[in-house]
Image (tube, rainbow, N blue to C red):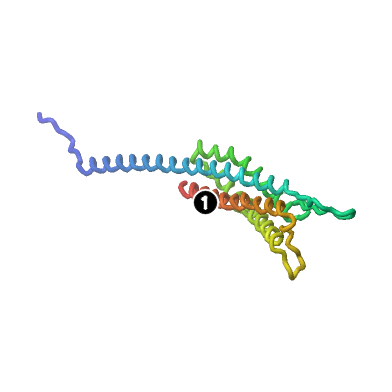
Amino acid sequence: MEDSKAPVSEHGGETSKAAVLVGVAAGSGGRRGRAATRVLAVVDLILRSVAVVATVGSAIAMGTTNQTLPFFTQFLRFKAQYSDLPTLTFFVVVNSIVAAYLVLSIPLSIVHIMASSAKYSRLVLVFFDAAMLLALVTAAASAAAAIVYLAHKGNARANWLAICQQFDSFCERISGSLIGSFAAMALLLLLILLSAAALARR
């Protein structure tokens, strides 16, 4: 009696091999995607830390700015400080708020490094980074920049005199404090783009 062997389908064998190759490729692609998302999370953490330094530096530089001229009269004392101008006070408050938020968001950024599949927490960060913080920093820095410009140049039509020739130290400090705030604007924009790129990989 002859042994009967079931015919082996060559086509079926090729199909199973192709399925295995596709599965391996998918797994490899998934690992690469998670690694790329983790790298984005690390960069996000670094940018947030730098933005904290920038905003804290701006708030401190502006908040400690004052200058008293060495001459005064019996009735007048020539002094300039940031609290004399509500716009500069707003600048200090906004940079302090943004710095506090960034510090509080750092643990969430660390979570994204460990759990690269997180999605909803990234959406929360994008909302706050874009809709609130970037708008606040832009408004505060732009308004403060306008005041700094008037302090340097004045406005003859409005009869506002330039004060930087007298209060040179005051003007140098308020001008320098803008650097950190504008740098924070750029960093927040990068953070939004990073979060968007990470979400696009989900």
- Quarter occupied by residue 122: top right
Give the answer, above or below, for where 109 lies relative to 174: above
**Residue at label 1?**
193
Q: Residue furthest left?
A: 1
Residue most extreme to the right: 74
- Structural crowding at the residue carrying mark 1, measured as other residues with C-alpha within 10 Å and reported as few (<14), some (14–19) or many (≥20): some
In the picture, measured across the screen, residue 99 lies left or right of residue 200, that is right
Q: Position of residue 56 (x, y in %)?
A: 65, 44
Would residue 184 appear left or right of 2 to someone viewing this image? right
- Quarter of the image holding residue 49? top right
Q: Nearer the viewer, residue 185 or 146?
A: 146
Closest to the observer, 166 or 15: 166
Please tell me which residue is depicted at 58% across the width and 50% down the height of the picture. 188
Q: Note whether 109 is above or below 163 in the view shown.
A: above
Q: Position of residue 179 (x, y in %)?
A: 62, 51
Residue sticking out furthest to the front: 71
What residue is drawn where x is 65% and y is 45%? 57
Comparing 167 with 7, the one in front is 167
Q: Position of residue 174 (x, y in %)?
A: 69, 52
Q: Nearer the viewer, residue 24 or 69?
A: 69
Q: Please identify the residue farthest to the bottom as the structure is shown.
A: 157
Give how far across and how far down residue 80 sits, in percent: 77, 53
* Residue drawn at 68 percent across, 61 percent down: 149
Q: Looking at the rendering, in which quadrant would you find the N terminus?
A: top left
Q: Residue at x 42, y 43 (%)?
A: 33
Count of marks, rendered view: 1
- Amino acid found under the numbered disc labelled 1: Leu
Which image quadrant for residue 36? top left
For the residue labelled by badge 1, is the local secondary structure a helix, a strand or a loop? helix
